[in-house]
Amino acid sequence: MNTKDLIIAHKLRRMILLTCGIALLVASNAFLALEFISYRQNLVEKSEVLADFIATNSSAALSFDDNKIASQLLESLHSETSVETATLYLPDGTVFAHYHRTEPVALAIDKGSQAWLAHLLQEKATTTEHRIEFEHVDTFKPIFLKGDHLGYMHIQFDLSPLYERIREYLLIISILWLLIMGGVYLLANRLHQRISRPIRDLVEGMQQVSDNQDFRLRLKAGDNDEIGTIINNFNYMLGQLDERESKLASYQEELQQKVDERTRDLREAKEAAESAREIAEAASRAKSEFLATMSHEIRTPMNGVMGMTELLLDSGLDIHTRRLADIAHRSAESLMGVINDILDFSKIEADKLQLSNEDFDLRNMLEDTLELMAGQAHRKGLELVPNLPPDLPARVSGDAVRLRQILINLLGNAIKFTERGEVRLWVRATRQEGGKQQVSFEVSDTGPGIDPKQQEKIFDAFSQADGSTTRRHGGTGLGLAIAKRLVTLMGGNLELESTPGEGANFRFSINLANAEAKKPLPVQTDILHGTRVLIVDDHPVNREILRNQVIAWGMREGCVTSGKEALERLHRAALANDPYQVVLLDWHVPGMDGLELALHIQQDEAIPTPCMVTLSSADVDMDSITMRDSGIACYLQKPVRQQQLLECLCGVMEKKSVLQPPGMVRPPKMTGKVLLAEDNKVNQEVATSMLIALGCKVDLAEDGKEAVQAFAKTSYDLILMDCHMPEMDGFDATSEIRQLEQEQGHEPIPIIALTADVQKGVKERCLAAGMNGYQSKPFKQQQLATLLQQWLPGSSSIQSVNSPPTEENVRSGKNSLLNPETLRQLRDLGHTAGRNVLKKVVDHFLHQAPEGMKKLYQALENQDAGQLQFLAHAMKSASANLGAMELSDRCRKLEDAAGNNKLSEAAALIDAVEAALAPATDALRLELKEETKALV
Ligand code: ADP
């Protein structure tokens, strides 16, 4: 085992044994060496004495040559056990007498001694010499007597007794060494007991303390040596630790108490916050409910105001009174707009607004929106400049309605606040990532801009930048707040950049999922390939957009900015024998207007007359005769849809006209007996007047109970049932009527709910109570008429006479959202009948359509093919009557599918109808607004 790993006791024992062993070894070796040296020293001294003695006593024998005496003398050395040999030599080196202890043989000495001796004899040495070897000591001495050299003497001493003695010593030393080491071992053990036991105790104590963390432990006090001191210090340290531990424990206890207190405080604060939250939520719920109630409460009198003013407007007023009544009516409508805005905002604030996700054609949606806003912009003389690059994704998935709402708000504001210049909508496909397309929208204008200070709060609810402009333009200050929140809900951020005096720029980017691409463009562009087209437009962006579009269709283009330039260019082209076949001319080019330029071109004999297409704003009113006379083949309203332009160009190249003559419409006529259950006097008046005006007979019930009684007594064709009435509400009354019918075996009578409650679930409640339909208040006469058409047996519907808006004749001009000719027909009819028919029909449609949509979904849910077919048919004819042909077309497809009982296809077809409905209703709303303005 490694020494390092030994315990201290063993280390100590080893060290003691090692030290003692080495000490003994050194001592015994020193003793032996000393013994050896002193023995040899003694021997040399003795050899000298003996040599002197032999030399003195042998001188006579040498003088007298008596070797007998000399031999005897040498023999006397026998008593000296250490003498091995002794020899007397004559001066010439010959042996005179010799003694050998064991055998008297001549010179039995080793070779080294012999050589040494021979050398001395030869040298005739005169002094005594010694030679010390391992086994023996040689002494050589010359013998003189009174100066005469008598000879030499050599004695050799044996050292073996010395070695014998050393061997004995070694034995004794070994025995002694063993005894001493044994003693030392025992002593070391005792030492270990005294030194290492306390250390071990100390170690064990430390171990115990470290294992159990028990600082109350104390070790037994030891001697007053270092270990004792360590133990004392350790005990002291334990004491300190113990003390600190108890202090810590008390701190900990204190801390724990504090933590408990804080936790309690926190819990209490949390509970307080929780209850505050609950109170806030309750307040928010109360706010929502209040808003709902308020909207209900406001809608009820509004019903009166709107209905009455509508009746007033239809009652053959003189111009002045009619103007006043119309202002009142429009004010009521704008108030409804404000209420809707507030409801929208409160819905977003209460997190109740859910975005839908449907596939839609982005370009179509944008073009619809632009078309919707174009009239407003053009009326103010503003250029509405769209930039919708060709790489925009074809079909995307998202909430088209809300996206349109945002854009309408931004474009509406831009148009509203800009007095001259232009309003731009720039849309760009920016980034494609994992099936999603990031699309950036930018609405900019050349209006007054917004002050940096105002910019900070422009997105806050109810905030309007400039009081004076706002007073001039109206508005709730909610538009941008709603738009901002909608953009946020879509994962984007609505930002504003504006320098006062230089206009405003609102922009945002959102991710729209790529949806399956729609069928390719139905129009073949082959006919346009290589055709030369001259673009006449002074607006660089418009020019660039048109240029890119015609290039994409394979046309050869040229661009000019004025009528004069256009004529020059056309001349040059004619001279070069490569004339332009098509001229795309903007109505407002500098120098001369589109009509003038067209006439010039047509009358100029040096120019082969090209097909001319004018691009005009909504304010240009051109009849077909003027167009024909000026040689204009087609006119398109700006902003021009890509598809529309393409079809127009293809059309003119095939020399086709796009205008169709208008048709006529006649108003509805109702018959039937209606029971009106309504407690509100104003509403009673409104509804009764409307019903009578429509040709119905009306009985009135003040509450549900009266309604049930009237139903039991009289036979009616239809019941209009207010939901909230005293005594018995509309739901209970309906249930009772249905029960009576069952008991008496009568056919169920159509019961339509009339309610100002627009909260979610009311409609379902009405249907659950056994009602057939639902009409929100306020409603218009036309809505009522539509209801009656739908539910009164034998009522005639709005029909086209003379030239009904068949699919073909509407299709011919239909690439716009609404067929202008159909609208014109309705307008004309209004003039002849002295009533605003267009307004009524549009109103009717706008109010009926969402309901119709819900019914469609309901019918699908109930798997009721008959009902589905009926509803689709109703919506088809209603939309066709308004020239919304895309919508009508989709309704027809749905009607066909339902008629063939293909309910599996119906869901997708209903979605398609809904997708077409939003742009159509927006366009109709705008139409309605313009109609109202035109009347003022
Ligand atoms: P409002 O319904 O009052 O128009 P908005 O939230 O849409 O409410 O707009 C808030 C205010 O922001 C407006 O009253 C107007 O002062 C300012 N504003 C919005 N858009 C523009 C714009 N394009 N140019 C100048 N001011 C604008």
Image: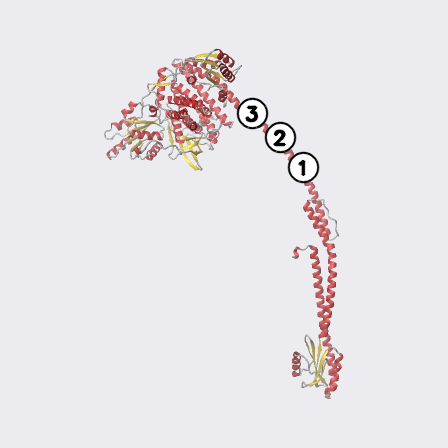
Residue density around tag 2, few if under 14, some if 14–19, many if 20 or more, within 10 Å? few
Q: Which residue is mark 1?
A: 254
Q: Give the tally of numbered discs.
A: 3
Q: Position of residue 524 (x, y in %)?
A: 32, 32
- Nearer the camera: disc 2 or disc 1: 2
Kindly state the secondary structure of the residue where label 3 is placed: helix
User: Can residue 593 be seen here?
Assistant: no
Residue 82 picture quarter: bottom right
Kindly state the secondary structure of the residue where label 2 is placed: helix
Q: Which residue is mark 2?
A: 268
Q: Position of residue 448 (x, y in %)?
A: 42, 28
Residue density around tag 1, few if under 14, some if 14–19, many if 20 or more, within 10 Å? few
- Nearer the camera: disc 3 or disc 1: 3
Q: Which badge, 3 or 1, is on the more N-terminal residue?
A: 1
Callout 3 amino acid: Ala
Q: Position of residue 187 (x, y in %)?
A: 74, 59
Kindly state the secondary structure of the residue where label 1 is placed: helix
Q: Which residue is mark 3?
A: 282
- Nearer the camera: disc 3 or disc 2: 3
Q: How far is mark 3 from mark 2, CA to CA?
A: 20 Å
